[in-house]
Amino acid sequence: MIFLGLLLAGAAIAFAAAVVMENSGAAQLNAFGETVPGVTHEWQVFAAGAVVAIVFMTGIALASFGFRRAMGLRRELRDLRYEHEESMQTLEMEKRHLQRELAQARRNAPGALQSSASG
């Protein structure tokens, strides 16, 4: 997969270089109704388009990274919440068990005191 990505990137660079080298005529670039200064050739228009594409792809990559990170944090929080609920349930069950043992020990304690006191 990495090799294919590098191959495609190399092909894109070669194509871009060919377009820049072949387009040497005069051109004018307008943006928002204004002429962009410093752009006088077709290759400069192409280069401006390439820069815009790079900025766009960088923005998409950053958004994608942020989305993946947020989803990972949500997943981790959900797992931690689930573990917390499980541990709380375990502690509640242990508490009930200890309360039953304590109640049983208290019931048995008066009889044990009487038998030892009479002997």
Image (cartoon, helix red, strand yellow):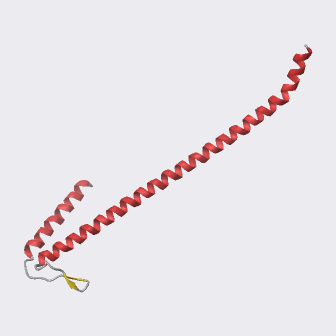
Q: Which residue extends farthest bottom? A: 33
Residue at horizontal 24 percent and vertical 71 percent from the top: 52
Q: Position of residue 28 (x, y in %)?
A: 14, 83
Q: Position of residue 93 (x, y in %)?
A: 69, 40
Q: Position of residue 98 (x, y in %)?
A: 73, 34
Q: Quadrant of the N terminus?
A: bottom left
Residue at horizontal 73 percent and vertical 39 percent from the top: 96
Q: Quadrant of residue 50?
A: bottom left
Q: Is residue 4 above or below residue 35?
A: above
Q: Quadrant of residue 30?
A: bottom left
Q: Is residue 34 left or right of residue 104?
A: left
Q: Is residue 45 left or right of residue 32?
A: left
Q: Is residue 80 left or right of residue 12?
A: right
Name the one closer to the observer, 16 or 67: 67
Q: Quadrant of residue 109?
A: top right
Name the one closer to the observer, 26 or 14: 26
Q: Position of residue 104 (x, y in %)?
A: 81, 31
How many marks the image carries: the answer is 0
Residue at horizontal 53 percent and vertical 53 percent from the top: 78
Q: Quadrant of the C terminus?
A: top right
Q: Which residue extends farthest right? A: 118
